[in-house]
């Protein structure tokens, strides 16, 4: 079914390791977003992209990197993982800017850094 | 500064009872307002949204919300709650330009038989 697909669903990393969280959408949405969700803290925007080749920082970008080489894919890279990056990560997309259409969310990646 | 406040961390209601989840926002311009629902282990699903016009908006699953500019509120309501409504509910506010959305910290709903 159409939607936003995130992989992996769960991952345990050791401090200092790196990994890439994958996000793909098949709805031809221009806008894509990465959020992290911490208990009692709501969702915080990490990075977003308004189209292939264009990315920008959100509210909490430190420790992360993104790229957008295609419309479909928007991977999130963690370099030198730290315990503070333990969180649930959500990828989302929207047809145009999200405020007009709302987001379609993926099912999330639960990351633990130990 | 922009912010969203959901004053109730957790609410418990009986099945069949009415429900109201509160959301207050702080925003300098006319906001776009959303309610999302998150079932355990799932992503967020859009329930409803408000941009302009009628201040009472209808959403999916029998939910509605009312925008009250004078109170800076966008409360979510449902006349009769079903056990399947147990989930986490998030209010969000966004600009009419740009991409920065702000989410509340969520309200966890428990439904008892």
Image (cartoon, rainbow, N blue to C red):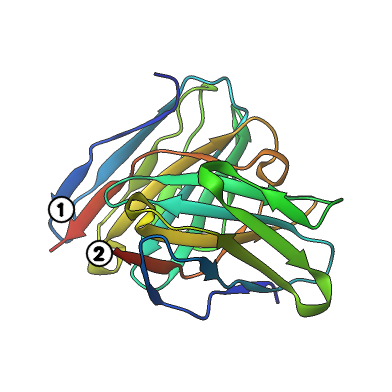
Chain of the residue under the numbered disc 2 shown in the image? A
| Position in image of residue A2 (x %, y %) | 44, 20
Kindly tell me whether residue A62 is visible in this rendering.
no
- Distance from the alpha carbon under mark 2 to that under mark 1: 9 Å
Around disc 1, counting alpha carbons within 10 Å, would you say few (fewer than 14), some (14 to 19), or many (20 or more)?
some
* SS state under label 2: loop
Quadrant placement of the N terminus of chain B: bottom right
Chain of the residue under the numbered disc 1 shown in the image? A
| Position in image of residue A66 (x %, y %) | 46, 41
Tag 1 residue: A13
Sequence-wise, the earlier of marks 2 and 1 is 1
- In the rendered image, which quarter is residue A38 located in? bottom left
* SS state under label 1: strand
| Position in image of residue A9 (x %, y %) | 23, 41
| Nearest to the observer: residue B113 or residue A65 | B113
Tag 2 residue: A82
Task: Please give left or right for residue A110 compared with residue B98 in the image.
Answer: left
Per the rendering, the mark at residue A35 is none
| Nearest to the observer: residue B106 or residue A12 | B106
Q: Return the residue found at the far front.
A: B16
Query: Which residue corresponds to the image point at 50% horizontal and 61% vertical from the top-left?
Result: B90
């Amino acid at each position: 079914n159409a939607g936003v697909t995130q992989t992996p669903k769960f991952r345990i990393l050791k401090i200092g390791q790196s990994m890439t969280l994958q996000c793909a959408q098949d709805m031809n949405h221009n806008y894509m977003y990465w959020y992290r969700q911490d208990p009692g803290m709501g969702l915080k925007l990490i990075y977003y992209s308004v189209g292939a080749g264009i990315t920008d920082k959100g509210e909490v970008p430190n420790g992360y990197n993104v790229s957008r080489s295609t419309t479909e894919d928007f991977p999130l890279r963690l370099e030198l993982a730290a315990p503070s990056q333990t969180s649930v990560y959500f990828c989302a997309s929207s047809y145009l800017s999200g405020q007009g259409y709302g987001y379609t969310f993926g099912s999330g990646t639960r990351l633990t850094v130990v | 500064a922009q912010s969203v406040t959901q004053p109730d961390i957790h609410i418990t209601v009986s099945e069949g009872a009415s429900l109201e989840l509160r959301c207050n926002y702080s925003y300098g311009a006319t906001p776009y307002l959303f309610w999302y629902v998150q079932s355990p282990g799932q992503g967020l699903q859009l329930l409803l949204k408000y941009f302009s016009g009628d201040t009472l908006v209808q959403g999916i699953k029998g939910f509605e919300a009312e925008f009250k500019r004078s109170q800076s509120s966008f409360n979510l309501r449902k006349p009769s709650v079903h056990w399947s409504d147990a989930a986490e509910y998030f209010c969000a506010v966004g600009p009419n330009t740009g991409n920065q959305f702000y989410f509340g910290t969520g309200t966890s709903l428990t439904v008892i038989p």
